[in-house]
Image (spheres, rainbow, N blue to C red):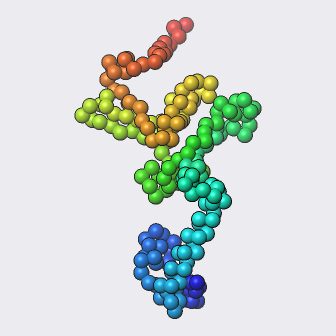
Amino acid sequence: MATALEAGDDPLPVQDENLLRLLEEVDPRLGARPRRARDEALLDSLVSAYADVGERLGPEPASWRWGDLHQIALRHPLSAHLPDDIRRLADVGPAPRGGSGDTVGNTSYGGDFNQRSGASFRMVIDVGNWDASVAMNNPGQSGDPRSPHYKDLFEPWAADEAFPLLYSRPAILEAAEARIELIPAPAE
């Protein structure tokens, strides 16, 4: 097993590049047999990780899915103070998530594997054809939990999908579900 760093040795900061260097290069700070110490540490951590995943996801590795651990649930800021029936409307999720803080989707998580951060709004703009642009907003396009559009985008967002982000008046009118006209009250 790896020996502890000798007193006075400067430990490397825990960063991906330093960890990779320790795995790829034989580091004399790992003791008299650094290659063996490194290999034993890797095998021990693999056995430990395998056992941990088995406890979390069951004994059959073929059924293990990252999204069964890494999920997101959105809790309304007032959720703890809402009656159960309103809380069920206001809270959204859970949904499985892919990736991590080191992937393109950047869905970082804490010790419980629940997503802690990541993009809630995404858009891809086609400046040559504005109506070909797409976007995604999470969890929906309404702030009213009673609206059908409060959380209708949550599942498509979690699946990394997008909706058309229309620009031209004809395209918008063709796709519109409703039109709300706001007219100021007459001056008294």
Q: Is residue 108 above or below residue 18?
A: above
Q: Is residue 130 left or right of residue 3?
A: left
The single residue placed furthest to the bottom in the displayed view is 32
Residue 111 versus residue 146 in the image, above or below: below
Q: Quadrant of residue 127?
A: top left
53 and 123: which is toward the camera: 53
User: Is any part of residue 56 visible from this angle?
Assistant: yes
Q: Position of residue 19 (x, y in %)?
A: 47, 73
Residue 167 placement, left or right of 81:
left
Picture residue at 61% right of the left edge, 41% below the top: 94
Q: Number of callouts in the render?
A: 0
Q: Quadrant of residue 139?
A: top right
The percent coordinates of residue 97 (x first, y second) are 53, 47
Is residue 111 at least partly visible in the picture?
A: no
Q: Residue at x 24, y 34 (%)?
A: 128
Q: 40 above or below 62?
A: below
Horizontal side, residue 130 vs residue 183: left or right:
left
Indicate the position of residue 106 as horizontal and vertical percent values: 47, 52
In this image, 34 relative to 147: left or right?
A: left
Spot occupied by residue 14 in the image (x, y as percentages of width and height): 51, 72
Q: Residue furthest left?
A: 128
Q: Quadrant of the C terminus?
A: top right
> Which residue is painted at 58% across and 45% down in the image?
72
Q: Residue 178 or 35: which is nearer the viewer?
A: 35
Residue at horizontal 37%, vertical 21%? 172
Q: Quadrant of the N terminus?
A: bottom right
